Amino acid sequence: MQSIVFITGATSGIGEACANIFARNGFDLIITGRRRERLDVLAARLRSEFNSKVLVLNFDVRDRNETIKNIESLPAEWQKIDVLINNAGLSLGLNSIHEGDIDDWETMIDTNLKGLLYVTRLITPGMVSRTSGHIINIGSIAGKDVYLKGNVYCATKFAVDALTKAMRMDLLNHGIKVTQVAPGAVNTEFSTVRFHGDTERANNVYKGFEPLLAEDVADVVWFAASRPKHVNINDILLMPSAQANASQFFRKTE
């Protein structure tokens, strides 16, 4: 088989865009996510368009037992994972800390932090045994710079930033690369999910400036993954030209 990439949260946005670019470059793919129908459609298109080998795993990274079950039952020919892209993540709500929804908090912590840890813990032993592999964590500007009412989401992404650095240290002697790609504003389902399906409010987030596209982020992920063996990209902060930090934008008025 070709090199294998394992992508969490591949049903939309950055995860789907990463699946496209890795398939285009000859990788076989393990794509995971909660929405089976979307995974099946993506897999069929990748097979047709790029002649890719694709394995679909339908599970939620928040579910520890399902994550273990799916990864530990990988067929032998799919167990040599070369690149892990920890992409699954979300933001819910935009409230001050004293008005926060605890269910939203738990979903963000379970997905952005614990889900990343579950998957990484299950896949890295194989990389260690082969002294080869690359982990790419999708972080955020929210893991570098806190913004108003971002509290718990920012906390989870600060944790991803810290974990990326810690993984790099822990796995250094095992020949494993570790990278974080931290985007600013990306026009995906992110804001629609954050506002619980309120598309009008979500669309207002991107008014007056040109945000990143999922493909822009995927290009950077591929750049990091395609460097020579002796080169590791530790951290990339990727922003729209109209964004300075987590909260400052230049928005054109009509």
Image (spheres, helix red, strand yellow):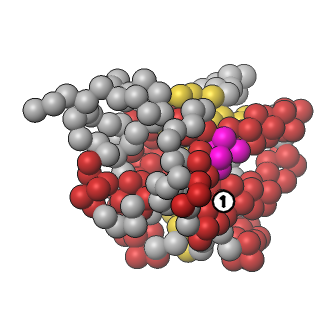
| Residue 165 drawn in magenta | no
Mark 1, other Cα within 10 Å: few <14 / some 14–19 / many ≥20: many
Left/right of residue 79 with respect to residue 107 in the rendered view: right
Position of the N terminus, as image quadrant, is: bottom right
Residue 185 location (% of width, % of height): 40, 39
Identify the residue at horizontal 57%, vertical 37% (top origin): 146
Looking at the image, which residue sits at the far front? 98
Q: Quadrant of residue 76?
A: bottom right
Q: Secondary structure at mark 1?
A: helix
Identify the residue at horizontal 49%, vertical 55% (top origin): 95
Left/right of residue 77 with respect to residue 147 in the rendered view: right
| Residue 158 drawn in magenta | yes
Front residue of this view, candidates 218 and 129: 218
In the rendered image, is residue 24 in sight?
no
Magenta-colored span: 155-159
Residue under pointer 1: 109
Identify the residue at horizontal 75%, vertical 77% (top origin): 65
> Which amino acid lies under the numbered mark 1 shown in the image of this protein?
Ile
Looking at the image, which residue sits at the far left? 254
